[in-house]
Image (cartoon, rainbow, N blue to C red):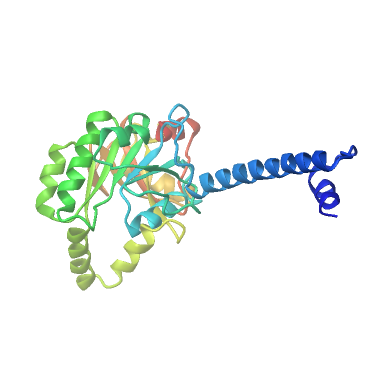
Amino acid sequence: ALWCILVFLLSGADVQPNTLVGRVIAMLVILEGVVIVSMFIAFVTAFHLRGGQRVNKKNLKNHIVICGWTPKARRIIRQLQSEDIRSKRPLVLLADLPENPIPEEDVYFVSGDPTRDEALRKAGIEKAYGAIVLADDKSENPDARSLLITLAVERLNPRVYTSVEVYDPENICHLERADADEIICLNQFGEYLILQSSVSHGISKLFASLLNFGEGDEIYRIPVPSQYVGRTFRQAFLDIGGKRECILIAAERDGEIMVNPKGAYTLQNGDYLFVISPEEPAFEPEGLAQALA
C-alpha cells in the first residue's frame, strides 16, 4: 500500500517494478528526489528572506546605499519608496548584521562593516548615486564612526552625494573636511525647531508635514526648467503658482540657497529650484532627465 501511494503521489509512473528489491530501489530514488527538491525550495526561501544578500554589482548603479542600521533606517527606506517620488532609485542596506533586518522591504541587503572598503564595494558604492550615513546609537563615539564611513565612501566614489547624520554640532566641521555633501545634526535642528515653535505656534506640525512623504505636500529640488532661464524668480513664482499645484520657495546657485530672493534675481542654467508640491514635479522631459542624472 505504501508503494502504491508513493508512486501515485510522487512519480506518476505507469511502469512499476515487479520485484521487492526493484520497488525498494525505486522508492529510494523517489524519496531522494523529494529531498533534493525540498532543499532547493528551502534555499530559495532563505535567500529571499535574507533579502537577496548578494548584490549583482554589474547591474546595480545610480542607487542609494544606506550605511548602518538603526530603527530610523526602516522609516527612511519606506519614505524613499513613497509613491510621491517619481525618480525612485534602488536601495542597498549595508549593515554589520548577519541577516537582513527588513526582509519584507524591497531593498538589497549586504552584510558588512560600512567602515571597510570591501563591504562598501560589495554594496556597489563606486557606482552609487547617493549614500546615507546613519549615526550608530550603540557606538561609544557615533560621530567618529560616521566620519570613518564618510571618508571611506568619498575615497571610493568622490562623485557620490553623501548625507551624514551627526550628534554633536561641533563635529560638523570634521565631516565638512571629509567632503560630506550634507550634514544633518538632529540635536541642533531640534533646538531650532523648538525655538521657532515658541514664536510661531504650529510650525513643528508644518515642518513634519513638509518633510514626510505621503502626507500632504513635500519640498522638492528640481533643475530650473529651460522656459524659466533668463526670467526673474518672481516671474517664475507667479507662472508656476498659476499653472501648477506648486509653490516656488527658493533657488540654489553654486551651492548657495536663496529663500524667496528679492529684486531682479534672474535664473540661470545650472540653477535649482525648491518647490512645495504634492508630488515630485516634472516640468519637461529634459529637466526631469537632468534630475535623474
Residue at left offset 72%, top offset 42%: 28
* Residue at x 46%, y 30% (from the top left corner): 286
Q: Quadrant of residue 196?
A: bottom left
Percent from the top left, x then y, of residue 37? 66, 42
Whether residue 254 is visible: no
* Quarter of the figure with the N terminus: bottom right
- Looking at the image, is 179 positioned above or below residue 135? above
Task: Please give left or right for residue 19 compared with residue 81 in the image.
Answer: right
The answer to which of 162 and 264 lies nearer the viewer is: 162
Image quadrant containing the C terminus: top left
Residue 161, compared with residue 280, is above or below; it is above
The quadrant holding residue 62 is top left
* Relative image position of residue 8 (x, y in whole percent): 85, 48
Residue 119 visible within the image: yes
* 120 left or right of 180 in image: right
Q: Is residue 111 above or below residue 155?
A: below
